[in-house]
Amino acid sequence: WNDYKAALSIAKVCGGRFIRVPVFVDNVRTDYGDIFGNPEDVISYRRKIGADSVLIFTDIHVKHAQLLSKNTLEKSAREATRKKSDAIIVTGKWTGDVPIPEDLRRVREAIGKFPILVGSGASSENMRKLIRFADGIIVGTSLKTGRREKKNVNIKRYTENIDEEKVRRFVKEFKKIIRR
């Protein structure tokens, strides 16, 4: 769930440009057990395998987890930037849940121009509101075929396909926003 060693190794070998590390500075309880952030180990491993060109995008207060750390969202964001994250990811509480816009605003105020990515819940209908405080969007669920299944961790099965028309709408809306 937080296997940065495998992610960095695969990215290095395959020419990947970035990885996502769900737990970087926070400590959380998940269905897979307690996970403790250790940014020094992540950065050290990247250096050790010669993958310095692979960017590390890190979640703060990651979805699908109970926060064990006592840090505020702002403090976790500032700590992640100090510990050499390359971008901060802000999510809702679950797959497909939109981050609270006020959370995005608070993180933006805490870390200034440092890159912020929306990590869940983005769609062509809500991206204008989300991108106001973010520099990019990670999107998946809203582009898939199928219906929401609330009881599953991934609310649309991995077997669902990406819908070409949904992608077109998403890209068209995104282009409108960035031209402003």
Image: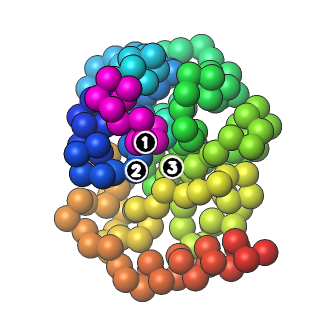
Q: Position of residue 5 (x, y in %)?
A: 27, 29
Point 29% across, 45% down: residue:
11
Identify whether 156 is placed above or below 2.
below
Query: What's the CA distance linking mark 1 and mark 2?
Result: 7 Å
Query: Is 39 or 68 nearer to us in this picture?
Result: 39
The magenta stretch spans residue 29: no
The residue at which mark 2 appears reads as 17
Using residue 3 as the reference point, say whether residue 90 is left or right of it: right
Q: Position of residue 147 (x, y in %)?
A: 34, 69
View extreme (front): residue: 50
Sequence-wise, the earlier of marks 2 and 3 is 2
Q: Position of residue 99 (x, y in %)?
A: 60, 48
Asked if the residues shown at circle 1 and circle 2 are in contact, with their CB atoms under 8 angstroms apart, the answer is: yes
The residue at which mark 3 appears reads as 119
Q: Is there any visible trace of residue 92 in the rendered image?
A: no
Q: Position of residue 7 (x, y in %)?
A: 29, 38
